[in-house]
Image (cartoon, rainbow, N blue to C red):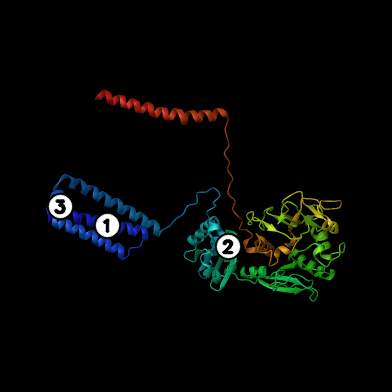
Amino acid sequence: MKRLAPLGLALGIGGFIAAAVIWILQRQFDVYVQGSLVVGLVGLALAMMLNPGVLQTWLGGRQARYGSNVLVMTVFFIGILVLVNYIIYKNPKRWDLTQDQTNTLAPETLDALKQLPQPVLAVGFYSAQSASTQTTAQQLLERYKIESAGKFNYEFHDPLSEPTVAQQYNITRDSTLVITMGQEREELSFASEQEVTGVLIRFTHPTKRVVYFVTGHGERDTTDLAEEGISKLSDLLKRQNYEVQTVNLQVTTTVPSEAKVLIIVGSKIPVTEIEVGVIRQYLDTGGKLVVLLDPPVQTQLEPGTAEPLVNYLQTTWGFKLPQDVIVDLYNSVSQQPLIPVTNSYNGGPITDKLQKIATGFPLVRTVVISGTPETFPNITYTQLVKTQDDRAWGETDLENLSASEAPAPGEGDTTPPFFIGVAAENTTTKARVVVFGDSDFANNTWSEQGANSQLFANIVNWAVADQNLLNLSTKLPTSRTLALMDALTINLILLVTVILMPLSVLILGGVVWFQRRRHI
């Protein structure tokens, strides 16, 4: 029977090894782990029963005494580690050792998390192509989860491999974050602390965010599902917790008081002087206006016809919109020079999240800042989108452009640099105006191209100007560069690290070897 003892020992060791492997793979103390432990214990018991003499001899030897000491010390060491880890697990503490505190949430964010009336779930939809973006979002959301005392959680899904979940949340594009609290829901296209905290504040302090689209001049319809409509962008605003309404300034003398922003998208005929007066009154009281105006060649406006709204923007806000069309022979969609494409942005809260994603603008006119600090001292300007190539020009002779086989800039054409969109803010009244020389980029056909829809959403978000987030600024990491030293210092570092240090180790080793040889 003693010959069978090694088999029992092998069975016992194999059972313990199997239990360890299964637990490492599954991280669950399930029936498989428990069964393997039972097999291991039974195998060891059999080995001791079949050959008890070996156990008695080992327990009485010097190895057993030394082994018991080691066993006791090992048990105490493991016990201390378990106790320390348990204390840390029950009392978590994090330290942000970065100079700029980039891993620490702002005080406004911490206050918003404390005020949450019920749990919040953030659901991110990122495909494999957006893995890096998902990693950044996960790091941010993990900080929210840790500081929320169980009120904030998150999960991620691949919209391509999990289409059912994507349909459930009405997801139409990659890299989308949906934040929900009860029946409240808001969709973000970019995960940043400012955006996520803004959602939490709006959940905690719900207010109506109503945007009004102007009608009556052939503007693009928010309910039109056809190619020229803007129903997709209207739906996008609704998913971001906006209420979309329309207003006809020809039948009302004031802009509705609940309007967070007034939007004009692609009017075919000019806005009248009376309507401009209504807009002026609205902006004088701190209103917000977004204007997307197409060039005259695309509307019913004869070249040279007065545009009251354009005149108002020039005289009151310092915007000039020439009656031209930008021609870009080198950066355009499918080599169509009247559809310039660009990923050149000047930064700021509207465009800094576009991450160099291109935007396209079919038939676009230029927007020029004619105002100066002397003529408009209370207005600050932000140039948003510009053409990517300085060889582009603004064509004013449209008949000659259509007849020419090799278009080229001529006399009277506007010259670069060209800006397709510009934003302005009156520092006294807090009124804000955004002007773009194109409305096609917002229609149902073009809004899904590149970053067009995200650009439009960012324009509206900036114009609304949520006052709760004015003090929540984006943290920018400190930029550090390696300052190279003079040649003498570099040579000294090379001499010490590459030659002297290895040589000293060799010399020390040789001395020790020689001393030992002498004592042999």
Q: Amino acid at mark 3?
A: Leu
Q: Which of 284 and 45 lies nearest the eye of the viewer? A: 45
In this rendering, the answer to whether 95 lies above or below 435 is above
Q: Position of residue 130 (x, y in %)?
A: 55, 58
| Left or right, 385 with reference to 479 | right
| Image quarter (top left, top right, bottom left or bottom right) of the C terminus | top left
Q: Which residue is mark 3?
A: 55
| Image quarter (top left, top right, bottom left or bottom right) of the N terminus | bottom left
Label 1 Cα neighbours within 10 Å, binned few <14 / some 14-19 / many ≥20: many
Q: Find residue 279 and report its image quarter.
A: bottom right
* Marks 3 and 2 in Cβ contact (< 8 Å): no
Q: Which residue is mark 1?
A: 16
In this rendering, the answer to whether 329 lies above or below 293 is above
Q: Position of residue 271 (x, y in %)?
A: 81, 68
Q: Amino acid at mark 1?
A: Phe
Give me the residue at 57% from left, 32% from top: 485
Q: Position of residue 264 (x, y in %)?
A: 75, 67
Q: Which residue is mark 2?
A: 174
Q: CA distance from mark 1 to mark 2?
A: 46 Å
* SS category of the residue bearing label 2: loop
The answer to whether any part of residue 208 appears in the image is yes
Q: Amino acid at mark 2?
A: Asp
* Marks 1 and 2 in Cβ contact (< 8 Å): no
Which tag, 1 or 2, sits closer to the chain's start? 1
Q: Which of 81 and 110 lies nearest the eye of the viewer? A: 81
| Left or right, 374 with reference to 159 | right
